[in-house]
Image (tube, rainbow, N blue to C red):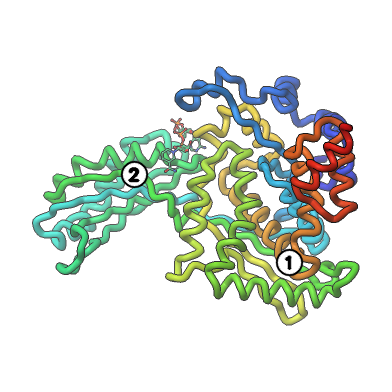
Amino acid sequence: MRTSRIPGFYNMTVEDRRELLSNMNIFTEEDTAYLFSNEPLPTTTADNMIENVVGTFPLPMGLGLNFLINGKEYAVPMAIEEASVVASASHIAKIVRNAGGFKTKANNRIMIGQIQVVGCEDVQTAKETIVNEKNRLIDEANAAYPSLVNRGGGAEDVNVRILNEDAGSKYSQMLILHIYINTCDAMGANIINTMVESLAPTVENLTGGKVYLRILSNYPDRCLAKARCVIPPELLATEKFSGQNVRDGIIHAYEFAASDPYRAVTHNKGIMNGIDPVVIATGNDWRAVEAGAHAYAARDGHYGSMTTWSVDDEGNLIGELELPMAIGTVGGSTHVHPVSRIAHKLLNVDSAQELAQVVVAVGLAQNLGALKALATDGIQKGHMALHSRSVAITAGATGEMIDVISRRLIEENEIRVGKAKELVEEYTK
Ligand code: NDP
């Protein structure tokens, strides 16, 4: 049986972790050859992915453990350069697991394609025509991508707005069409772009205007995923702080982010610390997810916290995170990069909807990890101890010296490159 609860994983050597994974009977020999290889992305594949390739840029990939989401176990692949993110996600996932796990849901994968029409003689009439011809546009969009319709997806709705209607506006008046498209298990950028480009001649005919932009919106506010956790305060207690204390600190930290954009950006960056590594490991477009998530955090006209934290009548801490999640389990580079193909196998998700739910659960865990640390000992204690190895390497430590120097940095409570350089010099004398 698959489990994400692997006690002691953190203390194992990389070789032992690899052996454990190999023995899970999830991967083929070819999979493990890529996963454990020093060249996980062959240069020939890289050269087919982008232009002007001169090499590849590997990132560490770790497993976020202990995730129990809607009763299912997930060992979550996370590709990231920053220390302490994977440890923190796993720590919180264990707490939430003991509280029954994350509950998540996602709605249908409705993405948006936009069409910009400029120069309509009578923009109101043009708008009405589009509304009246909505079904024709839906049919034509679907005719441009029949395989999507055969899968149960395709264009479902059309919406039209006039921008800059006011004669005093400094920008041109324009008609903007939104084509709502169910992209099934694909993120859908290329699918959508194909569909909206195909509609341009008809839209020009119907409106008498000129079509300029025909492209997806990276703000798919009908393609949402939501995660929730309910945690009894005693599960939050640390050696020095009571559970109630930690819970109340978390609520104050949340209220700070909800009311102040300067704090909200950092708070939300911490959420994306969990989200991006999963999006990257699964070969998805993390710029699209980042852009959509931040826009959603400002949907009421004020940039605030992506998460909400509250306390219920029994005193439990309740956390929620809802975000647009433009990701896929097929298409793009999800199965081009050998490691992302393997990451999908490890995650064992059946659909893009399910993957979206895992991603928001990790984001919620990451946020709680940061808030819990901030509300108690502060972030530096745990973070810097884990960061000490990177500091040692930056200072020139190699091989077994990395361990020795990083331990000294922690012991002497001075985790900085200048100090590490002194220690390296001393060690190599
Ligand atoms: P693809 O162009 O790879 O299209 C997805 C493909 O998946 C389709 O061709 C479809 O094949 C196939 N498919 C197989 N099974 C399914 C299924 N169950 N559901 C849906 N499709 C299925 O990728 P996307 O259109 O998803 O585009 C994503 C890529 O576009 C990313 O790499 C992204 O970086 C990039 N991009 C992003 C932009 C942005 O603004 N964010 C802009 C432009 C590109 P079939 O032909 O059989 O239907």
Q: Is residue 416 left or right of residue 13?
A: left
Q: Is residue 26 left or right of residue 326?
A: right
Instruction: Name the foreground residue: 204 vs 144.
Output: 204
Please identify the residue farthest to the bottom as the structure is shown: 313
Q: Which residue is mark 1?
A: 374
Percent across and percent down for residue 157 are 34, 53
Identify which amino acid the numbered label 1 is placed on: Leu
Percent across and percent down for residue 200 are 23, 42
User: Circle 1: is it few (<14), some (14-19), or many (20+) Cα within 10 Å?
Assistant: some
Instruction: Name the foreground residue: 293 vs 72.
Output: 293
Q: Is mark 2 within 8 Å of ligand 1?
A: yes
Instruction: Name the foreground residue: 272 vs 71.
Output: 272
N-term mark: 1 or 2: 2
Query: SS at mark 2?
Result: strand
Please identify the residue farthest to the top as the structure is shown: 44
Q: Residue at x 85, y 49 (%)?
A: 409
Mark number displayed over residue 65: none
Instruction: Name the foreground residue: 172 vs 93.
Output: 172
Mark 1–mark 2 distance (CA, rounded to whole Å): 41 Å
Percent across and percent down for residue 55 are 57, 23
